[in-house]
Amino acid sequence: MTNTTIDTVTINKADIASGGMKSYKQDDDSIILITRDDDEFQAFDGKCPHAGADLGTGLRCGNRVVCPWHHATFDSRDGTLLEPVATAGLTQYEVTDNGDSLTVNTSAKIDKKIANDKLIDTHTLIVGGGAAGFMTAHQLRNTGYGGKITLISADDKAPYNRPLLSKAFLAGNMPEEKLLLGGADWASKHDINLRLNQTVSEVSPNERTIIIKDKNGHSDRQTADFLVVATGAEPKIPPFKGAELDGVYTLRSMDDAKLIKVASHDQRVVIIGTGFIGMEVASALAQAGTTASITVIGQEHRVMGNIVSETVSNALIKLHEEKGIQFVFDASVTEIVEVEKADETSDSNFSQVGGVTLTNGECIDADIVILGTGVAPRIELFEEVNAPGGVQVDDRLQLRDGVYALGDIAKASGKMGRMRIEHWRVALQHGLVAAAAILNDESVSSLAARIPFFWTMQYGKSLRYSGHAATPDNNILFGSPDTLDYIEYYFDDDGEDTRASSASTLGHDKELVAFSELLRRGHAPTRTQLQAGFNIIDQAQVLSP
């Protein structure tokens, strides 16, 4: 590899089939992606703007270029962002047609700047600085909204990448500044009034009015033309004794992650919960290598039991045990034990965690306890609209005319029915869809044409999951989970002609992309088709317009 920047690259046209794409890695570590439709060629930066994956190793289905890692999707004709988790489209380069070849000039970028001249006399209020709130504001500005945008966040930090807290950040592999969404100057660069350390105490949907309180208790009443509420979720605290002790942590915010980093050093750590957050925290702390021990307690006999089959669960358990994680299964906690310790800086004692007691009487020694026991949506601001399981909104996230509820609080109507899903990519989808709804842009697909997707990173291995299934136990498994090389399809019942409603994988990225595209278009394979050797990649490409 060289440090010299390459500006022009010549490419043979015959290398790329019509309707296809191909990426070209350069000596300067850049990647050029070429897409072709008959005699029309387009050239783009071939690294996904989210995490740098080579888009050429993904899949092109019709006019959709799908990243193999996290399923960010771009228009093959102009690089427009069609699906997160990327938050921007692809950089496009000028192409010169030489007859049998093309010359791509990477120093000649096609200007896609959009004038912010739409709805210039309006005001959009966004409550919540998480993924959904950020993406709404970001997409509004990137697609021409010229009005005032105010984003209110209870956090003391600008919007940041929350999923990486339990992955790279806790493992010590990523600094805080790298987590900021859009960079340190995102709000000022996009002319967004970012109000941190402020909470909304009241929402009046019919009037599109909110009451904001700052940390000093001062109140401010604001009314807007468009009101977007994306207050997210908060950790569930189990009702057992001792959950309020010093040394008991949850992981939801940057501050939570920082506290856990410091508190876990040379300590016996107990994690309660075997969902993907609990497993990511175990992985990250093991990778950091700073704890004395890590024990995970689960109520069932498997990990991520509502997501993957027992076979896949066993493979994940094996992976963690090889890294030194201890498990206690089929166990319920009755108490986090309090102990008195001497304060070396004074003559007094203080109370802290000493262990965890189970229903069978067993006590597990612990210095700190991390609760990975789920989250609950923050829907208290919408009590008047009667939303006990989430705020019910349509496929454009609208609750009332000009009022939108997004992210973890939204029980939204979509491709797979009405459901509330607590995933980062779904929250970003909500922001993209809500921004289009505010701008009345019908060229952007609603939730009716989108499906859920999430991923979990453990010890550098990324397990990816697409769709939604009621249970992982009606399944078909291909490959070997023990060697972390499998794809598994899930069905809502055991019928031979039932179509798969979700899938998970380690190592079969193109197949999962293909499944996602078929699921999105209503053509997910049946159990019979999969057992007969259905070529899912070919079918996804054939059935995509």
Image (cartoon, rainbow, N blue to C red):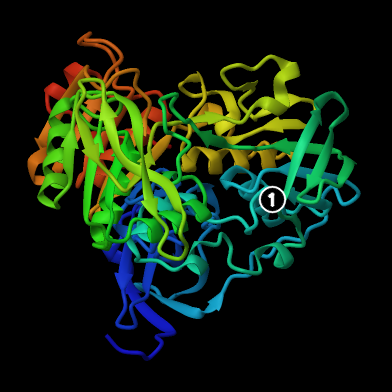
Residue 231 percent location from the top left of the image: 64, 37
Asked whether the viewer can see residue 134, the reply is: yes
Asked whether the viewer can see residue 541, the reply is: no
Q: Residue at x 75, y 17 (%)?
A: 384
Residue lying furthest front: 347
Q: Nearer the viewer, residue 449 or 295?
A: 295
Answer with the quarter of the image where residue 401 lies: top right
For the N terminus, the image quarter is: bottom left
Q: Nearer the viewer, residue 255 or 477?
A: 255
Callout 1 secondary element: helix
Q: Is residue 68 above or below residue 315?
A: below
Q: Nearer the viewer, residue 545 or 268?
A: 268
Q: Residue at x 22, y 17 (%)?
A: 474
In the picture of the structure, the residue carrying the numbered disc 1 is: 137
For the C terminus, the image quarter is: top left
Whether residue 200 sits left or right of residue 514 in the image: it is right
Q: Is residue 123 above or below residue 272?
A: below
Answer with the quarter of the image where residue 262 lies: bottom left
Q: Amino acid at mark 1?
A: Ala
Residue 296 percent location from the top left of the image: 24, 39
Residue 49 percent location from the top left of the image: 46, 62
Residue 105 percent location from the top left of the image: 47, 79
Whether residue 209 sits left or right of residue 363 in the image: it is right
Q: Residues within 10 Å of mark 1 (few under 14, many from 20)?
A: many
